[in-house]
Amino acid sequence: MRIGLLISEFNDKKECDICLGADRAARDLGAELIIFPGKYIVTDKTFDKEDPYLYQHQAVYDYSIDADFDGFIVDIDKIGHKAAILKKEAFLKQFGKKPLITVTETEGFECVASDKDTSDIELGYLAVEQILGKITGNNVKARRSEIEDFTVDKYRETIKKISEVSDIIINNKCNDDFEIGALKFIKSGIENYEMYILEEPVEYSLKKGWKIPKLCKKLFSIHDGKPDSTVNSKDMKISEVFNETGISGTKVIRNFFYERNQLGFFIIDFTDDLRVGYYDDILTNCIVAGSRNGYLENRLNNAERELAECQEEIARDGSVLDHIGDKDYLTDLPNRRGFFAKAYDLLKEHFREGTYAVVAYIDMDSLKNINAIHGHDEGDHAVIRVAQILNEVFGDKSVCGRIRGDEFAVLQVTEEEDKAEILRIEMARQNNKLLMDNTKYLNHLIYSICEFDYEESLSLREMLKETDDNLKNMRRMETLNK
């Protein structure tokens, strides 16, 4: 039997004691217990500007939904202490018809049967016994065993472990050799640990939520104090991670992220270290910091590669004047250089809290054929016509530029939410009209229009990349449909 125990955090002594009792009961009754500490439900109304990515922790709860669990125990009172009743109900309903009990009374859901004098450790025992009874239809009883007090020596040992592990992760002493990293973890006292990365970073925002990707990869793992040399070899389904893990007994899963991007998660065994309230948080924060360093290093490498490509492109391009000036000679719009200069200025002056950035990429899919069949004069006329349409659709408060021979980019900052959808409708109308303008050839546009909420860390390059990726997907769909 596999049971999920969803709590807020180990920093809360009540939560920690519930986990201690649940762990003892699960081990005695032969059940597998997996603990999901995800802080609490964060909403727009409970958003903390001083810790703007606190909500990212709650993503860990989502890993339990599609995985193979027989039942759940949820401390919805702690998890939802800042959320409205409807939010708490929606949280519980996402588990569907799987057996579920709550630690505290919640209308419409079964609660652990206990009395006011029941200790938190005993509450953990009762929760496991009752969820197993609900799953199997049989009454089960775990043997109670004494839980020793946490000693000063154990406290010091845990602090030492935290210090050593943080030094390994943050200072990247693994040197990208994960076996060496595993050995260093073992030396610091970590005996069971598995780190997984998602197939690609996934954005998670409060407004739009996030969608768990289907695949992940195990980066490195330690089982019973020994490194696993078979990791990093294959993708696995996230829904089957708990079937594949080599860590036995009670486990804890935590996610890690960088700003709005979920990067992965790790699984550790439930040990006495977690009774030092901040051990779990510090370990997670160290991994987040290490991931951030790796993420930034990758972005730096990508930026250097893009710079080299741009230099090569400029070296090949015969249109020297286009790179020296900031205006496209044909359309009178900003060229690539002019577009970026004006776009950065627009964002700096107007993109702030409560506004939205709308970014568009427009590709003249037919320009090469027009030039080849009807000549460059006719091609120039088609380009000018598209520039006129973009000015009509996006208006003079936008920055519109011809960034390549057959590509345009547009940036608009607006206080109107969902403005992108209005612009998509108008672009579709103008695109149909453009197709009817000339009977000699088709002047066909493929375009992508994306809208972005204000984020202090959000860059123009990131917005353009997402819009360009969307355009590439649309090109592929166009190709498949031909």
Image (cartoon, rainbow, N blue to C red):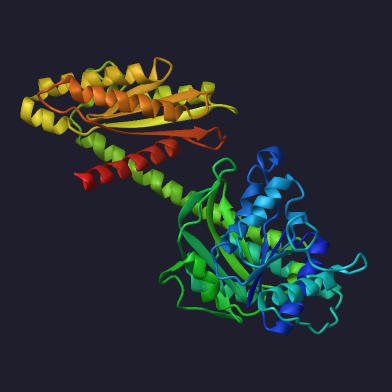
**In the shown orientation, is residue 223 left or right of residue 121?**
left
**In the shown orientation, is residue 120 left or right of residue 340?**
right
- Can residue 272 be seen by looking at this rendering? no
Q: Position of residue 82 (x, y in %)?
A: 75, 46
- Residue at the spot x=44%, y=36% of the render? 463
Image position of 389 with respect to 230: above or below: above
**In the shown orientation, is residue 55 left or right of residue 400?**
right
Q: Position of residue 477 (x, y in %)?
A: 27, 45
Q: Position of residue 441 (x, y in %)?
A: 12, 27
Choose between 57 and 458: the one closer to the eye: 57
Image position of 309 with respect to 346: above or below: below
- Residue at the spot x=82%, y=68% of the render? 113
Q: Position of residue 152 (x, y in %)?
A: 85, 72
- Residue at the spot x=57%, y=46% of the render? 259
Of the 4 image quadrants, the one containing the C terminus is top left
The image quarter in which residue 75 lies: bottom right
The image quarter in which residue 3 lies: bottom right
